[in-house]
Image (tube, rainbow, N blue to C red):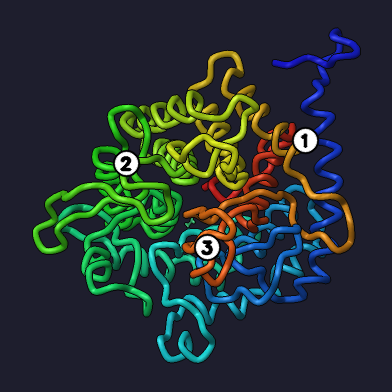
Amino acid sequence: MKKNMINDSTNVTDYEIERYDAMRDLNLKLYRNCLHYNGDIPTAVGSADGQHALSGKGQWTDGFWPGLLLLAYSGNQDDLLLREYERYMPFLEERVNNDSLVNKSRGYMDLDHDVGFIFHLTAVYHYLLTGSRSSRTVGLRSAEVLLGRYQKNGSYIRAWNDWETDTPQFRQEKKGKAIIDSLMNVPLLFWAAKETGQSCYRNAAEAHATQLARCIVREDGSTYHTYNFNHETGSPIGGSTVQGYSHTSAWSRGQAWAIYGFALAYRYTGNKDFLLASQRCLQYWIQSTLPEGDAPWDFAAPRNQWLPVDTSAMSIASCGILELGLHDSVDGELQEVAERIISRLLQAHRPPTSPYVHAFLLHGSVGPAYKEGSQEEKDRKYIYSNQSLIYGDYFLYESILRLQPSNILLPWDF
Ligand code: GLY
């Protein structure tokens, strides 16, 4: 444990002082953001200068801002934050219906495997915090959507739907595609199993996580972003990427989802294979980060002068490491690893405090990152690196809450 630099006989560490100071700033921003968002939701693609643009409703990221309000409520016990969250409940109720005509008319994506990000962090957590029956219903409906994507042939959860921009080949591939991110959605199924007593939810969650531990984690502990199965027979085909540098590379946010997702799967099952998978993924992370502690957007991207980092991967990884530390920590060793990442985020990647800056972090990468000015970048509608991402903010806040001394209820505590 890093001691205080001025007086090493105190139990207060420099990390704690830094986080305490940061948390005041994040809370101030969060209250100000209530005014800025005013019932709306930031976009999934973020912004370079820390000004989160609106209207992002209808994306995989719908849960992060309302979820942040609940995290802050859990940490601060201020009813105002709960009231602010409740403004989003009608939207979440409409969203979980997944009516294709409504989705089309409002520009919402049809729901896919990311229902966990949307509804676990909101409806399920709201139910855990308040006992709200309507939120319980929304949570269970979202779990049904996820369960409906489970493929018995192959034992995996299908990730994505068809998109308008798909090539015929990609559309075909997606029929049998699982992705690493989905590990963060399966806790929704573990919750539904516990809540309803129906084992089908738990069986699908455990089978999917088992399949990913086998297929998507490589020998060296790195991860494929996606894994393809033959959608008819269920036989494994091989790994590939959509948001990473190459099919054989390790996209750092995927690696972070793996550390965190497997650690959570262990929490709910006690299955040692998941603990081991999380530990192996963490080992790869530790040996692959940049000297100053940053995660490049992809661990196999060329390490030349132009190498965007992904702060969202770092904040997710720090939560995952803290989760892993609950189950496997030698003398707070893992806490120290997470504290170093959080400290790096706070020191090197925080935007200035200003009423016009909403983000908690700069320098996220949606992925794949293409150099500014390159043809690939010009062909895209948005810039995918050097962005403030609402999910980076969410997991930074969660990681700091996890380190606070009082027992704060998190969405994962059921
Ligand atoms: N789950 C989508 C992403 O991490 O970009």
Of residues 70 and 278, the one nearer the viewer is 278
Viewer-nearest of discs 3 and 1? 3
Label 3, label 1: how many angstroms apart (C-alpha)?
A: 29 Å
> Which residue is at 24% across, 74% downward?
168
Residue sticking out furthest to the top: 9
> Which residue is at 58% across, 32% downward?
322
> Which residue is at 82% across, 32% downward?
18
Label 1: which secondary element: helix
Q: Which mark is residue 377?
A: 3
- Label 2: which residue? 248
Under mark 2, the amino acid is Thr
Q: Quadrant of residue 85?
A: bottom right
Q: Position of residue 412 (x, y in %)?
A: 53, 47
- Quarter of the picture holding the N terminus: top right
Label 1, label 2: how many angstroms apart (C-alpha)?
A: 32 Å
Under mark 1, the amino acid is Gln
Q: How many C-alpha atoms fall within 10 Å of the one at disc 3: few (<14), some, or many (≥20)? A: some
Q: Position of residue 410 (x, y in %)?
A: 61, 47
Label 2, label 3: how many angstroms apart (C-alpha)?
A: 22 Å
- Label 1: which residue? 347
